[in-house]
Amino acid sequence: MAKRLIPLLNRVLIEKITPPSKTTAGILLPEKTSKLNSGKVVAVGPGSHTREGKLIPVSVKEGDTVLLPEYGGTEIKLGEKQYHLYRDEDILGTLHD
């Protein structure tokens, strides 16, 4: 069983962030309000090549928090953790505090 996955080309390995289902006071939150498709970038590939052979690097880096589309990506299970593999162009944007 593999313990580490390094994406190829312009793919990005993401661990989805699961929002809390209840507040600190114990109030249960509805599923719709807590559902934000975001994740943390775990690993990135080197990028893709143009027809001329130039390398186009991936636009995100490890540790970035990104906004993801509602559907898409490939689910991958490594050990006990669940990850998703996306192409760089499928990521909608980066989230900042």
Image: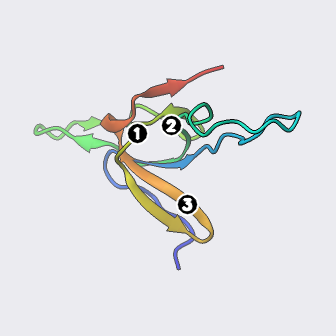
**Which of labels 3 and 2 is toward the front?**
2
Secondary element under disc 2, as helix, strand or loop, is loop
| Residue labelled with disc 1 | 70
- Look at label 1 and name its amino acid: Glu
| Residue labelled with disc 2 | 37
Q: Nearer the viewer, residue 2 or 95?
A: 95
Q: Earlier in the sequence, mark 1 or mark 3?
A: 1
Residue 73 drawn at (x, y percent)? 37, 50
Neighbour class for label 2 at 10 Å: few (<14), some, many (≥20)?
A: some
Q: Residue furthest top?
A: 97
Neighbour class for label 1 at 10 Å: few (<14), some, many (≥20)?
A: few
- Look at label 3 and name its amino acid: Gln
Classify the position of the C terminus by image quarter. top right
In the rendered structure, the answer to whether residue 60 lies left or right of residue 40 reads left
Mark 3 and mark 2: Cα distance apart in space: 15 Å
Q: Is residue 96 above or below residue 82?
A: above
Q: Quadrant of residue 31?
A: top right
| Residue labelled with disc 3 | 82
Mark 1 and mark 2: Cα distance apart in space: 6 Å
- Look at label 2 and name its amino acid: Asn
Q: Residue furthest left?
A: 51
Q: Quadrant of residue 62?
A: top right
Q: Residue furthest bottom?
A: 1
Q: Earlier in the sequence, mark 3 or mark 2?
A: 2
> Which residue is depicted at the point 61% across and 43% down?
17
Are the residues tagged 1 and 2 within 8 Å (C-beta)?
yes
> Which residue is depicted at the point 16% across and 38% down?
50
Residue 38 drawn at (x, y percent)? 53, 36
**Which of labels 1 and 3 is toward the front?**
1
In the rendered structure, the answer to whether residue 21 lies left or right of residue 8 reads right
Q: Nearer the viewer, residue 56 or 42?
A: 42
